[in-house]
C-alpha cells in the first residue's frame, strides 16, 4: 500500500469523495476542458508496438474521459 497508516487511507478517500461530490476536474493532466484549447478530448490514441507495428485505439469520450478524471483525482 502507498499509505503508511489507516488514517492516511481514510484521509485520501475523504479527499477523493470531496472532489467527486463537488464535481472537481483537476488541471495539469490534460483532462480539464480548459486544457484542450480549441480541440476536444482525444477520441483516438496511436500506440507504437514492437517491430514497428502501430495500433490505433478508439477512446470513446463517454467511456474514457470519466475514467481519466477519476484517475487524475486520485493523484
Image: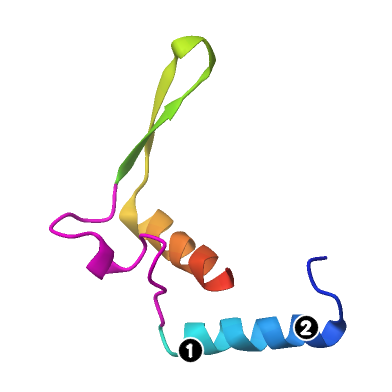
Q: Residues within 10 Å of mark 2 (few under 14, many from 20)?
A: few
In this image, 56 relative to 15: left or right?
A: left
Residue that mark 1 sits on: 21
Quarter-of-image position of residue 18: bottom right
Residue that mark 2 sits on: 8
Quadrant position of the C terminus in the picture: bottom right
- At a point 85% along the width and 83% down the height, the residue shown is 6
Characterize the magenta stretch by its predominant secondary structure. loop
Question: Secondary structure under badge 2?
Answer: helix
- At a point 81% along the width and 88% down the height, the residue shown is 7
Magenta region = 24-42
**Distance from Cα at disc 2 to Cα at disc 1:** 20 Å
**Does the magenta portion include 47?**
no
Q: Position of residue 46 (x, y in %)?
A: 37, 31
In this image, 48 relative to 16: left or right?
A: left
Q: Position of residue 10 (x, y in %)?
A: 75, 86
Amino acid at each position: 500500500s502507498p499509505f503508511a497508516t489507516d488514517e492516511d487511507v481514510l484521509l485520501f478517500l475523504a479527499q477523493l469523495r470531496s472532489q467527486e461530490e463537488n464535481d472537481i476536474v483537476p488541471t495539469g493532466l490534460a483532462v480539464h476542458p480548459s486544457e484542450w484549447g480549441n480541440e476536444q478530448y482525444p477520441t483516438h490514441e496511436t500506440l507504437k508496438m514492437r517491430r514497428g507495428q502501430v495500433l490505433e485505439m478508439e477512446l470513446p469520450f463517454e467511456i474514457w474521459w470519466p475514467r481519466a478524471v477519476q484517475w487524475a483525482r486520485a493523484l
